[in-house]
Structures are given as C-alpha cells and as structure tokens.
Image (cartoon, rainbow, N blue to C red):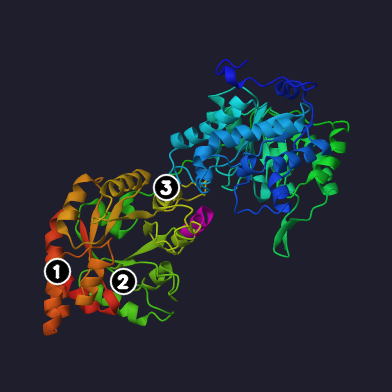
Amino acid sequence: MSSRNPGTTPHARPGVDPFRRVLEQGTVVLLDGAMGTMFYSKGIFINRAFEELNLTRPGLVRELHQEYVAAGADILETNTYTANRFRLSAHGLAEEVERINARGVEIAREAGGGRVWVAGSIGPLGVRIEPFGPIARTEARAVFAEQARALAIAGVDLFVVETFSHLPEIEEALRAVRELTDVPLVATVTVDKGGVTREGVEAGEAAERLVACGADVVGVNCSEALWTLDALEAMHRAVAVPLAGQPNAGQPREVQGRNIYLASPDYLVAWARRAMRVGTRLLGGCCGTTPDHIRILRQTVGETLPDQPAPVAARRAGTTPIVRPVRRAERSALAGALASGRFVLGAEMPLPIGCHVEEALAMARRLASAGATFLSLPEGTRSEARMPPYALAQLLAPVRGLEPVVYYSCRERRLARIQSDLLGVWATGVANLLLVTGEPTTSVVDAPTDLDVDSIGAVNLAARLNHGEDIGGNPIGKPTGFHLGVRLDPAAYDRERELSRHHWKVDAGAEFALTTPVFDTAALRTLIEGVEKIPIIATIWPLQSAAEAEFFEYERIDVPVPAEFVRRMQEAEASGAELDEGIAIARELALAVKPHVQGIQVYVADGRVETALAVLEAL
C-alpha cells in the first residue's frame, strides 16, 4: 500500500501480478495502440473531445478497448489522454475532470475483464508553461495533480505520462503523480530526426531528467520508428531503467481527405526486434496503430529476448564551454546610450509597400540629420505587400548615426520558427529587437489560436540565445547580442495586467520599453511609477486630421485621445490648419513627457516625414 495515499493502491487482478513486480523481472509486455485512430475510423472526428465519449458513448470506448485485448495487449491505456482542465475547457467540460477520468478507468477495467493492467493516460496541457508560456510551473503541476488524483482514486495499476515535447512540462506532470502515489510511472517523450526531442534535447539527457523526477520507465512515443529507435538507444546508454517504445505506424498520408498511416504491421515487428535489443520492455504503438499491429506484435513479444549490452547508469558528463554574454552597453549604440543614462531621440516608420526603398532611405537620412539616433521598423499587416523589417534594417546600413529597432511579432509563428527567425535576424546584423505579442489575425471569437508563444516567452527565448543556449538548453556556440525591448501601454484598460506582464517581461530579460502612442501624459506618469526601472521610450503620434483624432477616440480604445485634443483638431479642420495643430499637440505632449522618460520616438504617419521632423526639432 502507498504510504502517501491509501486510496491509490493498485487493485489485485486475477492472474495478473502487480505491475512493479513485472518491471523487476524484466518481462516484455505489450501496450495497446492508438485509440484516437480507432475513434477516427468509427466516424468520430477530431473536433470533439474523445474523452467525453467516456460519458456519452461508453459502449464504443469499451468496444475499442476489447479489440486491443483480443489482439493480445497486456496494458490498456485509459481514454483520458487530454482529460485535464485546460484541454476540456475548450469543450465546456472543465468541471467534468474527475468524472471523465474515473469513468475512463472503469470502462478500461470492464473491457479488460481482470486480465490486463490499466494505465492512467496523461498527456500535455495544450498550453505552454514558463519560460515560454503564460502558465506557471506550479499551476501546471496543480492541473496535472487534479487529473492524476482522479485516476489514482479510480485504481489504475500504473500511469503513462506521454507525448510530451517540452521537458519542463512533463517534469511537472511526473512530480504531480509522484506526490500522490507510488504506483509505477511510465514517461515518454516525442522526438525528431536523430532521436532528439523536438526542442533539441538529446534523448539520453531527457531520460536522466525523467528518472530524476520519479519515472520507473522512460521512452518514446508518437514519433517515427527510426527516430524512436535512435532515441531508445541513447536512453539505454544513459539510464538503468526499462524502456518503453510506441512509434507511429509510419508517416500519415492524406487519402480522400483523411489521414491514413500506411506502414504495415510487419514493419512494426522489425522495429520491435531492434528495440528489444536496447532494453525496451514495453512495446506498443501510437498514431496509426490498430489491433492488427498489436496482434502481430504479440508474436514478437513471445520470442526469446535477444542478448543486449548492459545499460549504463549515467552518461559521461561532457565539458560545457563557458559562454560570456555580450555586455549590455556593447550590444548597440542605443543600448550604450540607454545604459549610460543619455536621453535618446528616434522615429517609427512603417515599411514601404513593395520592394523599392529609395524614398524610405531618403526619409531615414532626413530623420538622422534632425537628431534621430534610432529608427523603429514595425511589421506590416498580413494583407500588405511589405518586406520584413530586418530586410529594410540591412538596407539602412549606409545611413550614418541611425540604428534600426526591428519589431518581431509572435503571431502565426511556432516557438521553433521564432528561434530560427531570431538567429537569422541576428546574423543579418540587427541588434535592437522589439518583441511584441502582435494583434490577432482574426476577429472570430472561437477561432483557433494563432499564438504559440507571447512576447514574454519570446523574451525568454531571446535571452537564452544571448546566453548561448537554444530552447532545449543546448549550446549554440557564440551567443547572440540582442538588445531586448518590449511594448508598454500607458492607456491599458487593465492596468494591473499591464503592470504584471511588464514585470514578467523584465524578469525574462527585457532591457528597454517602447510605449504605445501617448496622448494622456498623466496615465503615462502613473504607470511609470509602478513599473520595473528599465529605460522607457515614449511614442509621440502627430495627429494628421480631425477624422484621425475621432478614430482614436471612438474606435481605438487601446490608444484613447482626450476630448480636448479632438476638439482642437475639429476646430483646426474648419480653418484648414489640421497638420499645424497636430504638430502643436505633439510638441506639447513630447515636452510634457520628456522629464519622465529616457527617450522619445516620433511616428512618421503616411510618409509625412515633415511632421515628425517638426516635433524632433522642438526637442
């Protein structure tokens, strides 16, 4: 009996030994295959929560389990892979975590008829955790614990924590289970080519970390067979625990609108024989594997175990080179100026449409002559034919005394893509980087999210690159030297959230902040009093017309224009002096905020560089 929780004792099964004893004996046992694949074949599509079927169609779930038992599976994984609060909330089922998980164990138990072990399946949360996501590790552990507790109380014989690519997340899942129960714990990750995790961590290192968090069995699932084998070999050299392998049945192919896995069961058998040679004792399949695959694997499990080299308890530690980050003041001229406390002037200019940049370069030269030392380059909207900011930044090199600040939005970019992009941006010579979450690309409320990582996670990533590490903690050689900036919104509707997010950005490594356009100087002063003490550069937007002022007042709630300024612009419209009045307001704002910030940038609207120059001259 577990000393931690009497309610988590694995139930004795007729003719079935406690699973930990089987592990100690080194017996090869057979896991089941892909429940998702089978549901899909029965007409249940992926826009549903398969776990909900535990409540709405338990007969179907039981039938599929029974097919795997009839095929020879020794272990049934419960239909609870995504039955955590975060994943279920998307289907309005967040309050059904306990019932769905408990019912999943009950159905598997009924299908097994006391002849198989029942494993509680736990998968990823479906949201990123720190340092690249908004969910704290403690919060993630609590969500995993809620699911694990329901499975443990229902009486699983073991846990299978599976299909993770982010090691910190699976570590929290393992800790959550281990704090509840002592039943055997299987932990599997997904890998890419070469047998490394999808975040670049070598499989042997991953195995060591999983064992350190309490895993009794480690392994690989939901990956190509050859990659899985590479990873299992590395794990066998690194740890002295049994291994688990559950590869996909080949790569999916689209056939008449459906994903079909075409690898034959014979191919899986050939893989299994190789896997057993390197210490794999739990065999099964993931995506695309059916009862037919498990049935033929049953014959392989019954074969005599091949001789295998003894596992190594720990890998020989290599010598990690010491990487010294570039000192902040040396990363760029802007970084040096801000680090020394100097006041800076700059401008923000939208990128030109098309690929002809002569006019943009001419404007940049005029801005530099007026005293601007940096030029911010925001990304254009997805519907406009504008080049990426870092490309124009390269073309600005001949403009002496003017450094680019390149915006980078996280929208529609996966974490690995962001990492590659930032390495490319650094290689082109860009040092000043402004990381923003970005505007949603659709206004549809229930549309799938296009955000994998927000600006906080992106700052964490860039800071790692500045320390010579990638997202998996692997060395990249010479570090990048980004001067990291973030956005700050003085007019944020939720002031506490803005302050909290700013705190996390600074904690992640942000070194300066650029504000959204400032029209309310009192709001800016109030916000500055509560933020972390990093240099803040205020953005001044010269209004071009009364219509623009009205647009900001009534439609852009994130950039409100005081009624007094709207009135002044409307009066100026009547006399044909809108541009002059917009410049006058911008000058007033710039002089009012100057004592409270360390820099000001002026927005160049609609290519009217003269208005920006007029404001810069006043400073």
User: Taking 234 as reference, is 43 above or below it?
Assistant: below
Three-letter amino acid code at disc 2? Met
| Residue 617 visible in rendering | no
- Please state if 86 lies on the left or on the right of 157 as rendered: left
Image quadrant holding the N terminus, namely top right
Label 2 SS:
loop
Q: Nearer the viewer, residue 192 or 606?
A: 606
Determine which residue is flagged by label 2. Answer: 349
The label number, if any, that marks residue 460 in the structure image: 3
Determine which residue is flagged by label 1. Answer: 565
Of mark 2 and mark 3, the one earlier in the sequence is: 2
Q: Residues within 10 Å of mark 3 (few under 14, many from 20)?
A: many
Q: Nearer the viewer, residue 284 or 494?
A: 494
Q: Nearer the viewer, residue 458 or 119?
A: 119
- Return the x and y of residue 452 as percentages of the image width and height: 49, 53
- Return the x and y of residue 260 as percentages of the image width and height: 74, 57
Label 3 SS:
helix
